[in-house]
Image (cartoon, helix red, strand yellow):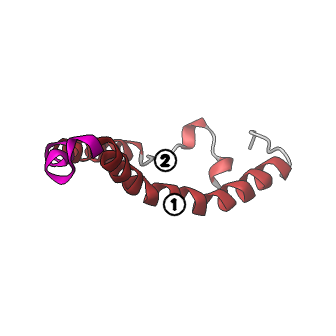
Amino acid sequence: MHRHDRVDGDRERGHGPVGWVLAVIGVVTYEAAVVYYNAYLPRIAPPERLGRVSGGGIRTSAMPDRWWRSCRLPFAAVHAYWVASSPPRSCSR
């Protein structure tokens, strides 16, 4: 049975709660890291360069996210094409 073939009574338990908990843990740990980052920033750079050093740190931390998004883009495009070109499915059994 494909995931598109299910009807309302056949729903399986998803991974939504696990994903939600992992997302909350990720946000909390990221914010805790930002607190320590901001606390050490005055020791790393002089006051006139704080903005440039802070921006460089945030930019560097965002690079893996940009890399993963660029890797997923071709797969998302193929999936969108496949869904758009497939014939509609009926909901009846």
For the point 37% across and 55% down, which residue is it? 61
Q: Earlier in the sequence, mark 1 or mark 2?
A: 2
**Which residue is located at x 62 percent, y 51 percent?**
3
Residues at badges 1 and 2 in contact (C-beta under 8 Å)? Answer: no
Q: Is residue 91 magenta?
A: no
Quarter of the rendering occupied by the N terminus: bottom right
The vertical placement of 87 against 75, above or below, is above
Secondary-structure class at tag 2: loop
Residue at the front extreme, as displayed:
48
Q: Indicate the amino acid at tag 1.
A: Trp
User: What is the number of callouts on the image?
Assistant: 2
Label ID, residue 34: none
Where residue 27 appears, x then y in whole percent? 30, 42
Residue placed farthest to the top in the image?
A: 8
Whole-percent x, y for residue 43 in the image: 13, 50
Q: Which residues are magenta?
A: 36-49
Residue 88: quarter of image: top right
Which of labels 1 and 2 is toward the front?
1
Please rate how many residues cluster around mark 2, counting C-alpha atoms within 10 Å: few if below 14, some from 14 to 19, many from 20.
Answer: few
Of residues 37 and 90, the one nearer the viewer is 37
Q: Provide the secondary structure element on which disc 1 rests.
A: helix
Q: What is the three-letter code of the residue carrying label 2?
A: Glu
Q: Is residue 74 left or right of residue 46?
A: right
Q: Is residue 34 visible?
A: yes
Please determine whether, in this image, residue 74 is positioned above or below residue 55. Answer: below
Q: Which residue is mark 2?
A: 12
- The residue depicted at 67 percent of the width and 55 percent of the height is 76
Q: Main secondary structure of the magenta part?
A: helix
Quickly name the residue at label 1.
Answer: 68
Residue at 56% over, 43% down: 10
